[in-house]
Amino acid sequence: MRGTRASQPWQLFGDAAVTQRGQLGEHMNTSSSRRALLGAIFAAALLGAAGSAIAAAGGAPRKARVFVKGGESIVPNAYLKLSFHFDAGTVPIRSGGTVTLTNLTTEGHTLSIVKASQVPHTIRQLQNCSACLAIDKAHGINPEGPPVEGPPPNLLVNAGGPGFDAPGDSVIIPPKGRGAPVSFKVTAKPGTVLNFICAFHPWMQGRFLVK
């Protein structure tokens, strides 16, 4: 990362890509009838809750698209602007649904799942992103070494079960024009929040809301 971390560790990126989740009736007076009525109300409540859950799940898309946007600019004697970002940053997705990543920039990126506590919030945390270093190494990248030609050795890192479901899961996103969009399944359980960053530009952040 220029300005805060080392420049991304390759110069050229090949064409490799990864394609990889009724009415209750009349008034009743007897005790047994009241118990029956209460049972019917309870059952109706359960059915209503189940229906709400189904509706909530139905509201989450089976497919989602995330774009990488932004760039670099400089104002001499003023500032360097790095505007790379994920769009959208908050992504509802059904468990088992598919996410497709499209890079609209000329830089390579990652989408990497991290713990909430590992998401950087300050310049110091950006400069000392231990999760980023671990992700780089998992992809076969040596951030301390010289830039190398070609894509990193490991385009996909699967730290948990199949699909994206746990911190450490990560995928390389090739620069625009150097490969097809990247797709993967989100397999975390409904109710899970998966925080993600770009390990090369860790101010790029977002989260999957798994339904």
Image (cartoon, rainbow, N blue to C red):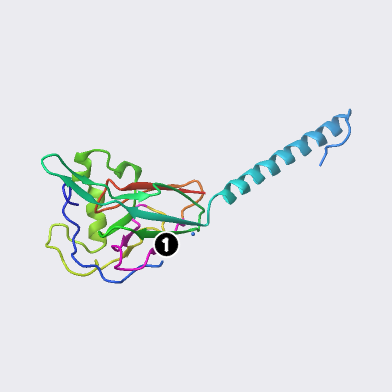
Give the percent coordinates (x, y) of residue 128: 19, 45
Q: Quadrant of residue 37?
A: top right
- Horizontal arrangement in the rendering, residue 97 relative to residue 112 (left or right): right
Q: Main secondary structure of the magenta part?
A: loop
Residue pictured at 42% horizontal, 62% vertical: 184
In front here: 28 or 194? 194
- Above or below, 46 against 135 in this view is above
Q: Is residue 194 visible?
A: no
Residue pictured at 22% horizontal, 41% vertical: 125
For label 1, the crowd category at 10 Å Cα-Cα, with few meaning under 14, some 14 to 19 and many 20 or more, is many
Q: Is residue 182 magenta?
A: yes
Q: Is residue 70 visible?
A: yes
Give the percent coordinates (x, y) of residue 20: 41, 66
Q: Residue furthest bottom?
A: 15
Residue pictured at 21% horizontal, 62% vertical: 141
Give the percent coordinates (x, y) of residue 96: 50, 58
Residue pictured at 61% horizontal, 45% vertical: 53
- Horizontal arrangement in the rendering, residue 183 relative to residue 35 (left or right): left
Q: Quadrant of residue 36?
A: top right
Label 1 sits on what residue type? Phe
Instruction: Give the extent of the magenta segment.
Output: 167-187
In front here: 47 or 86? 86
In front here: 176 or 162? 176
- Horizontal arrangement in the rendering, residue 144 relative to residue 202 (left or right): left
- Above or below, 173 against 113 in this view is below
Q: Is residue 72 magenta?
A: no
Q: Which residue is mark 1?
A: 184
Q: Quadrant of residue 9?
A: bottom left
Q: Secondary structure at mark 1?
A: strand
